[in-house]
Amino acid sequence: MTDAVIKLIIPARNEEDAIGQVVASVINQVDAVIVADNGSGDKTAQIAREQGAAVVSVPQPGYGRACLAGVDAAGDCDILVFMDGDASDDPDDLLALLAPLLRDEADLVIGSRILGRCDPGALTVQQRFGNTLACRLMQLFWGHKFTDLGPFRAISRQAYEQLNMEAPTFGWTVEMQVRALKAGLRCAEIPVQYRVRIGVSKISGTVKGVILAGVYILGTIFKEAVWTKNSQS
């Protein structure tokens, strides 16, 4: 897949302080950068366009909705990359993230912040606990050991089309991993650096965000587990 067409999707909501540097850091490494502007009330969309990104408007809040809209806007390509717009993901890890796909050794590659290096304070205690619990549940139900639900990830477009992704909010990342396991896809992790984000997190930055994220993530896992059980009975 040496001539692979690679498109990078950045779901973003009120990230005007970071989005410019994020887009600029990857715009020359991929074939297109698509910012899914998730109802921002600031200059996120304007700054992203100024840095060369295509921008799709997604007025209704929801991380999954933004990702779904970004995929639709991407059109034809060989590989989809997802990256946060808050400068927490390190663009220097992009080539390592893509390598297993380009070598046809994996269908889905997760950038693991747990295997890599996290700046002090970049991952909260709540995030670490939630990641650990979700990964242990996935291992229990589907027998694969992930270490993280990291948002910096890459998947072949062909593999993505098998997943029928639909989670509208915080369950998006874990839904992708679970459905990839259920579909028998080759899943891999590579260590990535995780930096302190610019601005306040919409998830870990508030008590409400933490609770909702936990509910959606665990709810997605148990829903998928029930569907698996029902399909086998």
Image (spheres, grey):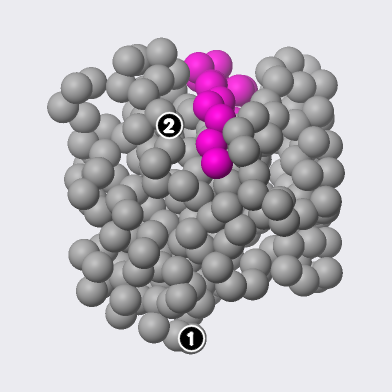
The x, y position of residue 83, in whole percent, is: 45, 50
In primary-sequence order, the first of circles 1 and 2 is 1
Above or below residue 211? Residue 175 is above
Find numbered disc 2 in the image and state the secondary structure of the residue it sits on.
helix
Task: Report which quarter residue 176 is drawn in.
Answer: top right
Residue 161: percent from left, percent from top:
40, 34
Residue at 61% x, 58% y is 196
Quadrant location of the N terminus? top left
Q: Residues within 10 Å of mark 1 (few under 14, many from 20)?
A: few
Q: Is residue 179 magenta?
A: yes
Q: Which quadrant of the structure image shows residue 47?
A: bottom left
Q: Which residue does the image show at 56% across and 30% down from the upper left?
A: 191
- Image coordinates of residue 78 in percent, x first then y, are 27, 33
Q: Label 1: which residue? A: 41
Residue at disc 1, secondary structure: loop
Front residue of this view, candidates 137 and 110: 110
Q: Residue at x 43, y 23 (%)?
A: 107
Label 2 belongs to which residue? 97
